[in-house]
Image: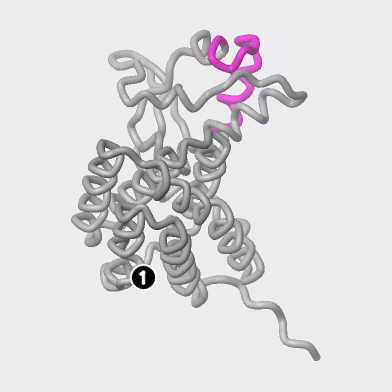
Amino acid sequence: MDGKGWTRHIEPVRSAGAAEAIARRLGELIGARILVGGDRLPPEKTLAELFGVAVMTVRHSMAVLREDGLIETRRGHGAGTYVVPDILARIGELTALHPYTLADIEELTAWRIAVSGEASARAARRASAAGLARMRELEAAADAAVADAEAYRTADACLHLHIAELSGSRRLLEAEQGIQHELTRLLAHHPGGTESRSTPGQRHRALAAAIEAHDPARAREQFTVHAEATADLFLPFVQQPPHPA
């Protein structure tokens, strides 16, 4: 049911508004490309056990995600609940309803530098040989996918999530998932072109090299370059503040 191991990112929900919190968490896993189009969700009973809530609470969460067009329930052969196949198109439609502003981009970039920059620095200090080898594989996969916007978004998210895992911090990993969710929202609406995804600032070689060299300061610096290059890609598409009269 969970061959990808994504349910390890789920923890019991103990706050009020559990149904909304569960819908938000599953939506975040979809946005972070941990769950992708066509992935099947576990039965409601299993999800209820994972989140530590009643089945009816999960049912309400599923209704929210279904109403947003992020999941669909199929009957007959292959019955179950799935992430919709055209998930990036649907996320793009939802993003268009509430477009990002310049202030949003600046805030997201600052948050990325704080969270992902720290994760990169910690990864440079802590990464094992096996972790570095996996990072190189994910970097190569991202480079190979630059011509396909959807494949690149998945590969890029996987790489940054892996670096966050190498940091050894659960909270940094959870924060990175939220960041990747927001980036997917932005890129689903404005995916850019192959040329923009191929620029040195968007490639990950300098960042990966700093982590491989176990140089935390350089890893943080190279991530800052990467985050600012990403922000520059969005500027032509975001809402600009009105000029004063």
In the rendered image, the vertical position of residue 134 relative to residue 227, given as above or below: above
Overall secondary structure of the magenta stretch?
A: helix
Residue at far bottom of view: 245
Q: 143 or 207: nearer the eye?
A: 207
Instruction: State the residue at coordinates (33%, 13%).
Output: 76
Judge whether residue 147 is colored magenta.
Answer: no
Q: Which residue is mark 1?
A: 201
In the rendered image, the vertical position of residue 48 relative to residue 115, given as above or below: above
Instruction: State the residue at coordinates (53%, 33%).
Output: 170
Instruction: State the residue at coordinates (57%, 32%).
Output: 25
The coloring applied to the image is one colour
**Where does residue 42 sit, x and y in percent of width and height?**
43, 16
Q: Which residues are magenta?
A: 49-65
**Where does residue 155 sit, x and y in percent of width and height?**
30, 48
Q: 203 or 28: nearer the eye?
A: 203
Is 5 placed left or right of 101 in the picture? Answer: left
Residue 82: name its quadrant: top left
Is 150 placed left or right of 7 in the picture? Answer: left
Is 156 placed left or right of 19 in the picture? Answer: left
Judge whether residue 63 is colored magenta.
Answer: yes
Count of labels shown? 1
Residue type marked 1? Gly
Q: Is residue 211 visible?
A: yes
Instruction: State the residue at coordinates (56%, 24%).
Output: 62
**Where does residue 106 sit, x and y in percent of width and height?**
61, 68
In the rendered image, the vertical position of residue 27 relative to residue 183, given as above or below: above
**Where does residue 98 sit, x and y in percent of width and height?**
62, 57
Quadrant the N terminus occupies? top left
Q: Is residue 93 visible?
A: no
Label 1 sits on a secondary structure element that is: loop
Q: 41 or 125: nearer the eye?
A: 125
Residue at far right of view: 245
